[in-house]
Amino acid sequence: MTTWSAQNLVSNLSVGILVVDESLAVCFANAAAESFFEQSCNQLQGQPLSKIFLYSSLETARLQKAIRYRDSFSDGE
């Protein structure tokens, strides 16, 4: 699958997707995420997850480790 078609697929999913970098700042939000958060991708970009999800059980250290080592991550693990 090419990069363009993968991005097109993610962009058109009905499930909200946020892509974050190693510092857990938003890099991309698809249309469903924009609708859910009532903000455009441009408005979401650069915002830390901690600002978007004020109250969360997300273990950010585990998420950052998974990103660093390119491992899968599930908040339920």
Image (cartoon, rainbow, N blue to C red):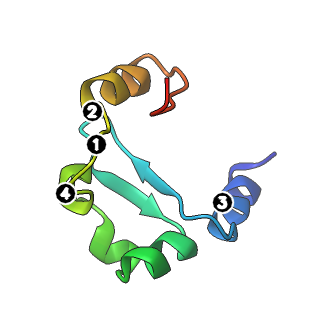
Of badges 4 and 1, nearer the viewer stands: 4
Q: Earlier in the sequence, mark 3 or mark 1?
A: 3
Q: Circle 2 is placed at which residue position?
A: 60
Q: CA distance from mark 2 to mark 4?
A: 13 Å
Identify the amino acid type marked 2: Thr
Quadrant (top left, top right, bottom left, bottom right) of the N terminus: top right
Q: Position of residue 48 (x, y in %)?
A: 21, 53
Label 3 residue SS: helix
Q: 10 Å neighbourhood of mark 4: few (<14), some, or many (≥20)?
A: few
Q: Earlier in the sequence, mark 3 or mark 2?
A: 3
Identify the amino acid type marked 1: Leu
Mark 1 touching mark 2, by CB under 8 A?
Answer: yes
Q: 10 Å neighbourhood of mark 3: few (<14), some, or many (≥20)?
A: some
Residue 10 sits in quarter: bottom right
Q: CA distance from mark 1 to mark 2?
A: 8 Å
Q: Circle 1 is placed at which residue position?
A: 24
Q: 10 Å neighbourhood of mark 1: few (<14), some, or many (≥20)?
A: some
Q: Circle 4 is placed at which residue position?
A: 54
Left or right: where 10 falls relative to 51 = right
Q: Position of residue 12 (x, y in %)?
A: 69, 71
Left or right: where 46 falls relative to 15 = left
